[in-house]
Image (cartoon, rainbow, N blue to C red):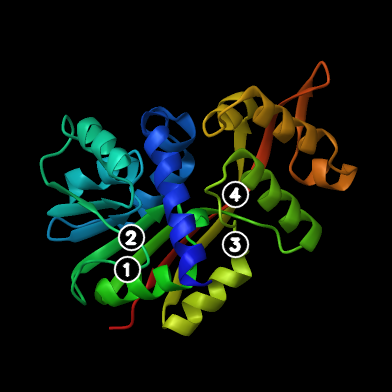
Amino acid sequence: MNDKIFDDVKAKVQQQFGENAKKYVESKNHSKGADLQLLLEWTAPKESWTVLDIATGGGHVTKLLAPHVKQVFATDITVEMLKEAKQFLEQYASNVHFIVADAENLPFLDESFDLVTCRIAAHHFPNADEFIKEAYRVLKPGGKLLLVDNVAPEEKVLDEFINKLELLRDNSHVRCYTKSEWESWMKQTGFTQIKSHVSRKHLEYQSWVQRTTTSSKQISSVTKFMENAEKHVQEYFDFQKEADEITAFKLDEWIVMLEKES
């Protein structure tokens, strides 16, 4: 991706999350979920750890980990998002540092962190392979990366559908990468995969579509695209309807823990 496109994507992300920052703090899809409990169990955080939470969004991972570790550096590329997270987290933790940072170009020295986390954000990264390299670089030997994100199915039709749907709803969306894409980058970088789990995430349609859309016309476009999807697609994503109106559907979500060689 050339520099101009790269900058345009980053600007869209900053605009989208800047305008909707509070929604992400309050979003049930982001503040709750079985993946949060799994994240805590898998990482087994220690009091001596320094943690980096990349693209912290509403700060929900930071809130979860802060009571168990020495300090957390919560980063985000969007200033407004970081301000909302700071306001939200001040009542829960005093060991958090808030820093504006690009996930693909982190402002930290090599081997600085015991744990790096990134949850439900990487589909906004235009060069996700660079994010993986940066996470590896800033981890201490033996340190771990915990990634959670929506993933596209390996089947091309399903992949194309979910990524077009996300882009119709949110113009800052880049790509729900496939699990095989992620695993290729992880292996090339030198990570060892320790744990992996794919689940079906239930999304209530109205709150999902309203979180990032800016007009009723845009919402109608998203709805029409879903309604016109072929039967195979609707079945895979488990469209749920009441009175012929879509009320919910499901996405594939992957949680994976990786370790940097000692």
CB atoms at circles 2 and 1 under 8 Å apart?
A: yes
Image spot of residue 89 (x, y percent) = 22, 35
Image spot of residue 160 (x, y percent) = 74, 56
Q: Which amino acid does label 3 sit on?
A: Tyr
Of the residues tagged 4 and 1, which is closer to the observer?
1
Question: Which circle marks residue 25 in the picture?
Answer: none
Q: Dividing the image into 4 quarters, which one contains the C terminus?
A: bottom left
Question: Which circle marks residue 177 in the picture?
Answer: 3
Snapshot quadrant of residue 210: top right
Q: What residue type is labelled 2?
A: Asp
List the residue tagged with mark 1: 105
> How far apart, in angstroms, are the residues tagged by discs 1 and 3?
20 Å
Question: Which circle marks residue 102 in the picture?
Answer: 2
Q: In this view, does 219 lie above or below 150?
A: above
Image spot of residue 33 (x, y percent) = 47, 38
Badge 3 or badge 4: first in the primary sequence: 3
Question: Which circle marks residue 199 in the picture?
Answer: 4
Q: Is mark 1 on a helix, strand or loop?
A: loop
Residue 210 falls left or right of residue 49:
right
